[in-house]
Amino acid sequence: MKIAMVGSGYVGLVSGACFADFGHDVVCIDKDQSKIDRLHDGVMPIYEPGLAELVGANVKAGRLTFTTSLAEGIKGADAIFIAVGTPSRRGDGHADLSFVYAVAKEIGESLANDAVIVTKSTVPVGTGDEVERILADSGTSHRFAVVSNPEFLREGAAIGDFKRPDRIVIGAEDDFGRDVMREVYRPLFLNESPILFTGRRTSELIKYAANAFLATKITFINEMADLCEKVGADVQDVSRGIGMDNRIGAKFLHAGPGYGGSCFPKDTLALLKTAEDFDSPTRIVEAVVKVNDSRKRAMGRKVLDALGGADNARGKKVALLGLTFKPNTDDMRDSPAIAVAQTLTDAGVEVAAYDPEGMEQARPLMPEVTMVEDPYAAIDGAHAIAIVTEWDVFRALDFNRIKDLAKAPVLVDLRNIYRPDDVRALGFDYSSIGRIFREA
Ligand code: UDX
């Protein structure tokens, strides 16, 4: 099978490389000449574990190529994936579809054979209909079908998620679309990954519903964590206790500083917009968005509390460990660290930060924060240390060294990566999420 992937960003590149690895012949297309040049040189535009090796191996095997020319790239392709960005439109939160539609138009104008056009980008309900209209309007004489095939890739685990998915969702309106997609995913189907065929609009909604549900789960446990702190309960045990119920499930019940990233914040907003447009309010998701937004600032206040309150914070120093919205990515989009840093610097706190991959992207977002080259440089002279992202390197910190370097042994663990008793036994003033300290 020949596959064209239009858009060589996160989703396009990971999907393209994985399809090539399954033995398909894949062309990744992107308008950005420098990105394509770098890909030719083996340089990845994003940090994703295992991606450089996967791309390298498939380029070497001749199954994966790159081009800036859409017309060239889609020639002979059985399936053409649209995997360009759908950022939140400024002002109303609606997904900005201008890139998707521009690509659809260009595909229509360049189509040289029958093909299935697949929207992989996260697009609101009805986008497939519009893409179909644009293609029809282009006057192409070739047979085409427009299919929705949402991605469910987690950053940092994207290759594994692609190769061993819980399910593949395909929204198609005709047999041509369904048959080609069955071939595209045959290698996974043989691995017994279930493929769910639905209508196109349903498939588009499944993606938003999945992300909104996961965001709700996280936000629910975060509120339970707040309640745990008030009533003297332990949120880790609450998560375990409810997660063992198969109807609830154990995943995405880890309390923390609030969800961030490229998907949940953007997709929940876009779902709200769709619900508003269709006059069918989704009040639970409305609440989730509000609660999560306010939580990020509240996490900054939690760090201020550890310093003795906002009134005592001015001139003190805090070490932020971890900046990205989660580990194993360099992605800073909607990371809680941004609001935490802002709350601290607003209160006159001096902030030094270390992140294994995210500092370059973080710098322009938090100009008042000093970025340093290792965790202990951040901790040097700090009155409090806050773990914001659960990178592995922070899981076994040298507490004796910290005691020597820091002005005070104060640790705020926003990801619950330590056990309160262990850290307190070392003489630390330790606070975390949803776990209060009770004297034995
Ligand atoms: C998510 C979805 O998981 C994926 O299916 C979709 O296609 C894109 O969005 P991603 O944003 O890469 O993936 O990361 P994910 O691992 O889902 O985490 C999202 C955010 O939720 C992070 O900020 C993370 O720290 C937070 N989170 C996740 C929690 O706070 N608690 C949890 O239990 C899980």
Image (cartoon, rainbow, N blue to C red):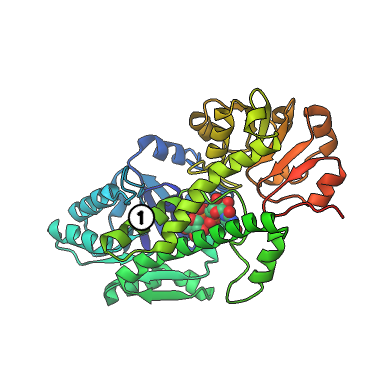
Q: Residue 220: where, in percent of width, then height?
A: 55, 61
Q: Could you say which is closer to the camera, residue 151 or residue 292?
A: 292
Residue 356: image quadrant is top right
83 above or below 69?
A: below
Q: Mark 1: few, some, or many residues within 10 Å (few <14, many ≥20)?
A: many
| Residue at (45, 51) in percent of width and height | 265
Q: Could you say which is closer to the camera, residue 12 or residue 356?
A: 356
| Residue at (68, 65) in percent of width and height | 238
User: Which residue type carries mark 1?
Assistant: Ala
Q: Is residue 406 left or right of residue 158?
A: right
| Residue at (29, 47) in percent of width and height | 99
Q: Is residue 330 left or right of residue 196?
A: right
Q: Residue 288: where, in percent of width, then height?
A: 47, 57
Q: Residue 426: where, in percent of width, then height?
A: 86, 42
Q: Could you say which is closer to the camera, residue 5 or residue 242?
A: 242
| Residue at (27, 55) in percent of width and height | 75
Q: Residue 346: where, in percent of width, then height?
A: 54, 29
Residue 298: image quadrant is top right
230 above or below 68?
A: below
Query: What residue is pinned by disc 1?
Result: 270
Quarter of the rendering occupied by the C terminus: bottom right
Residue 175: image quadrant is bottom left
Per the image, label 1 sits on a secondary structure element best described as: helix
Quarter of the rendering occupied by the N terminus: bottom left
Q: Is residue 428 left or right of residue 138?
A: right
Q: Farthest residue toward the top?
A: 315
> Which quarter is ligand 1 in?
bottom right
